[in-house]
């Protein structure tokens, strides 16, 4: 069975065609600048990249171009669209309408439309892409939500202390994001721990990238996570401020003379590593600036490590124990320096990192960087969100 995974942004569309028999990626690519100047597709197959520049007015144009690449005689991978068994869509927000991956029939389409406002930058793009896919390829469409893995959070963890009837009327509460990543790496960790006859009940997964979030996974289920109603909450990130006192936002808005919309944009785009360091939102650039003696870059790094450590402490209490910490995402997988800073001096919690091995551990595979005497396992696991979307799509399609 071949499944096409698509991930639509407001002006972009990434895709992977996956053969589910061996879970191998047949080809992949991305369309950029949809609806704006400079639109193009980069299609990668058998180690080669094909770039086509072409005006693309909307997601339908973009998806038509994806299908042209997939079925191209020279570098395509399928001879006709019928070879695609299903399309799996990454959708950022599920609201309270969905708690698992969902087959998109007319009713589900209406439900999706009713929650589009919850993630105005992301969900409308997924809807546009979904409509294009439905009109161009005759196969089942399944939505896999970033929020779904977190739907098991108990109310005490997911509600904000606003009047209950306002929560009921607005669906405003903590949802959490990066769910497919937290799900994938926690399942991989459980497999690894079981194979070593080690305890696997209480796992903290740290997805650290441009956007970062931390999840407490008890017995395979999310019990708490750091992002909130939107992906702005929780940790300091590349350009996002993370947790901030709600009343301070009004003060800042007055100081900057900004509307609430402008303020939300500022908190999402101008803060985080970028705002604190004044250097960059990129972790590698931050590390380079630290080497050159930039104190504000060091401050941004220290805030990041400090906040991750605090989440590890609080989630250990939430789960009443800790068996394993997982690092994933661009920074978590490739940044030994942050893993060391996070785990340093936590011996009192049974957390001991092997500093030397952590520095030279191979990349692109599961590695165990815990010291021999560490009670808590410290793992680095490359995430694979597309594979989770493909697996869940397959499961839904098989159950139809
Ligand atoms: P992601 O959003 O998961 O793609 O992660 C992007 C972040 O990972 C950026 O801040 C990058 O600087 C960081 N990153 C990527 N590669 C490396 C690397 N080799 N060392 C340190 N950070 C990295």
Image (cartoon, rainbow, N blue to C red):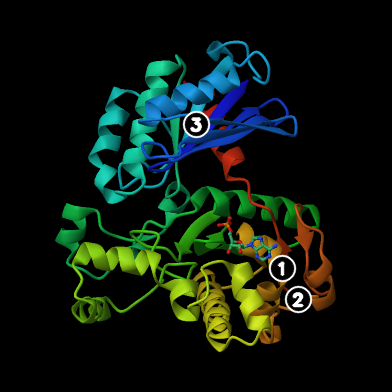
Indicate which quadrant contains ligand 1.
Answer: bottom right
Residue drawn at the location 30% of the way across and 29% of the way down: 109
N-terminal of the two: label 1 or label 2?
Answer: 2
Q: Can you tell which mark lies on residue 88?
A: 3
* Residue of label 1: 378
Estimate how packed mark 1 is, as few (under 14), some (14 to 19) or many (20 or more) residues with alpha carbons within 10 Å: many
- How far apart marks 3 and 1 lie (CA) works out to 32 Å
Q: Is residue 20 above or below residue 314?
A: above
Q: Position of residue 238 (x, y in %)?
A: 49, 67
Which numbered dot is residue 353? Answer: 2
**As displayed, is residue 184 above or below residue 173?**
above
Viewer-proximal residue among 240 and 38? 38
Cα–Cα gap, marks 1 and 2: 7 Å
Q: Residue at x 59, y 74 (%)?
A: 286
If you read the primary sequence from the N terminus, does the residue marked by circle 2 or circle 3 appear first?
A: 3
Q: Is residue 223 above or below residue 95?
A: below
Residue 317 relative to residue 266: left or right:
right
Residue neighbourhood size for the residue with mark 3, other residues' Cα within 10 Å, grouped as few (<14), some (14–19), many (≥20): many
């Amino acid at each position: 069975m071949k499944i096409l995974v698509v991930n639509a942004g407001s002006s972009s569309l990434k895709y992977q065609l996956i053969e589910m028999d061996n879970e191998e990626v047949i080809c992949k690519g991305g369309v950029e600048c949809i609806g704006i100047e400079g639109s193009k597709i980069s299609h990668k197959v058998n180690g080669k990249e094909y770039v086509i520049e072409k005006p693309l007015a909307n997601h339908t144009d973009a998806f038509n171009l994806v299908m042209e690449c997939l079925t191209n005689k020279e570098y395509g991978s399928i001879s006709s669209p019928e070879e695609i068994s299903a399309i799996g869509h990454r959708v950022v927000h599920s609201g309270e309408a969905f708690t698992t991956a969902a087959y998109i029939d007319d009713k589900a389409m209406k439900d999706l439309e009713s929650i589009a406002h919850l993630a105005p930058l992301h969900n409308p793009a997924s809807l546009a892409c979904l409509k294009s896919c439905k009109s161009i390829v005759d196969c089942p469409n399944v939505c896999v939500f970033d929020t779904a893995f977190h739907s098991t959070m108990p109310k005490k963890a997911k509600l904000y202390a606003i009047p209950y009837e306002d929560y009921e009327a607005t669906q405003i509460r903590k949802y959490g994001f990066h769910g497919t990543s937290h799900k994938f790496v926690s399942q991989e960790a459980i497999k690894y721990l079981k194979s070593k006859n080690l305890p696997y009940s209480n796992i903290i997964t740290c997805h650290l990238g441009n956007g970062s979030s931390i999840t407490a996974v008890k017995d395979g289920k999310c019990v708490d996570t750091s992002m909130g109603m939107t992906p702005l909450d929780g940790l300091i990130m590349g350009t996002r401020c993370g947790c901030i006192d709600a009343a301070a936002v009004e003060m800042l808005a007055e100081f900057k003379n900004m509307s609430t919309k402008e303020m939300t944009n500022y908190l999402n785009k101008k803060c985080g590593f970028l705002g604190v360091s004044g250097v960059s939102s990129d972790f590698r650039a931050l590390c380079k600036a630290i080497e050159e003696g930039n104190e504000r870059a060091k401050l941004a790094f220290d805030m990041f490590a400090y906040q991750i450590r605090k989440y590890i402490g609080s989630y250990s209490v939430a789960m009443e124990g800790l068996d394993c910490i997982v690092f994933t995402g661009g920074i978590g997988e490739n940044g030994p320096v942050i893993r060391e800073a996070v785990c340093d001096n936590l011996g009192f919690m049974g957390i001991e990192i092997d500093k030397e091995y952590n520095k030279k551990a191979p990349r692109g595979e599961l590695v165990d960087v815990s010291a021999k005497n560490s009670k808590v396992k410290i793992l680095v696991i490359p995430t694979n969100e597309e594979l989770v979307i493909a697996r869940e799509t397959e499961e839904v399609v098989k159950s139809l």
